[in-house]
Image (cartoon, rainbow, N blue to C red):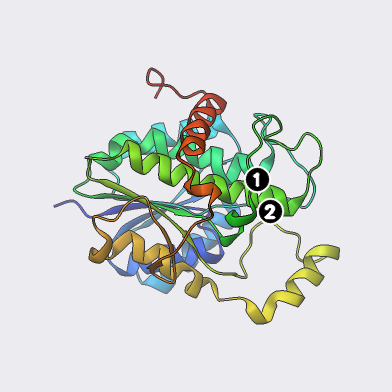
Amino acid sequence: MLKKIAIVTGANSGMGLATTIALAKQNIHVIMVCRNPEKGEKALHEAQEASDSGDIELMLCDLSSLSHIRQFCDEFKSKYPKLDILINNAGVVSLKRQETEDGFEAMLGVNHLGHFLLTNLLLDHLKAAPQGRIVVVSSGAHKWGKMDFENPYFKNGYNVVKGYGRSKLANVLFSRGLSQRLEGTNVTVNSLHPGAVATNLGVDRTTGFGKNFIKMLVPFFRTAEEGAKTAIFLATSPTVEKTTGHYFYNEKEAPIAKTAKDDELVERFWKWSESEVGLNSTNR
């Protein structure tokens, strides 16, 4: 029987690295998806040492680039016949408005749209596993997120708090929309709030805002290992084998914002996301 195969995005530090180590300790073959080759190699050695597993590999993918994501998926699918676990963990926080190469605002682009394309392109491989699981790392910040289809990328009125909230609301809407589409299959999808984790989300922690903000919040932060617990639980626990379309915190189901419960918004947002990444049934 083939060993379970897991993909963890944003695996070079923080929760992604902690998740990689925990999965490898459970005898799962883990593919660490990282953007930066040097940081990726360093994290790979750290994960191998900490887990005492040689069954971890590094694959490069820039989630801010749709073409990179397509290349990565082609490479993965040529090497492996199935995918048991997909953990969409990578995330960025942009204090100033930035755009991806495809013209998306960076947080919505990486935190949602990149993972939206990645997940859809890997669905057939998840269905080929005995029981595929998709885990989407969202945040309690989704509760202050709002979607504006007229100004999705904050061409005006950019604000890091609003932008991050929108990208995390997107994670929950995506999970709900995907769970509806996967009804009757062997694949589940759930999202989660990891708690406030002191992890490398791409905020500059050494100057100005970053440094003072982090110093203020340090007493409330969890470690990366604590933050990763719910993702590991959703990826591996037999108790949630049949659970899909839910949101978790501390390994328990948790309520979502009223906005995220709006089925019409879930559907509209799914179609918008498909259009943005150029996905339809003929070009998967």
Q: Is residue 219 left or right of residue 130?
A: right
Quarter of the figure that contains the C terminus:
top left
> Which residue sits at x=55%, y=44%?
170
- Dot 2 lies on which element? loop
Q: Are marks 1 and 2 in contact (CB under 8 Å)?
A: yes
> Which residue sits at x=72%, y=54%?
161
- Dot 1 lies on which element? helix
Neighbor class of circle 2 (other Cα within 10 Å; few <14, some 14-19, many 20+) is: many
The answer to whether residue 36 is visible is no
> Which residue sits at x=39%, y=69%?
251
Q: Is residue 137 left or right of residue 182?
A: right
- Closer to the camera in the image, 52 or 83: 83
Q: Quadrant of residue 152?
A: top right
Circle 1 sits on which residue?
107
| Residue 138 x, y percent position in the rendering | 52, 55
Q: Amino acid at mark 2?
A: Val
- Closer to the camera in the image, 174 or 135: 174
Q: Mark 1 or mark 2: which comes first in sequence?
A: 2
Image disc number at residue 64: none
| Residue 28 x, y percent position in the rendering | 29, 60
Q: CA distance from mark 1 to mark 2?
A: 6 Å
Image vertical order of residue 277 relative to residue 132, above or below: above
| Residue 114 x, y percent position in the rendering | 54, 39
Image vertical order of residue 143 relative to residue 239, above or below: above
Circle 2 sits on which residue?
93
Q: Amino acid at mark 1?
A: Met
Neighbor class of circle 1 (other Cα within 10 Å; few <14, some 14-19, many 20+) is: many
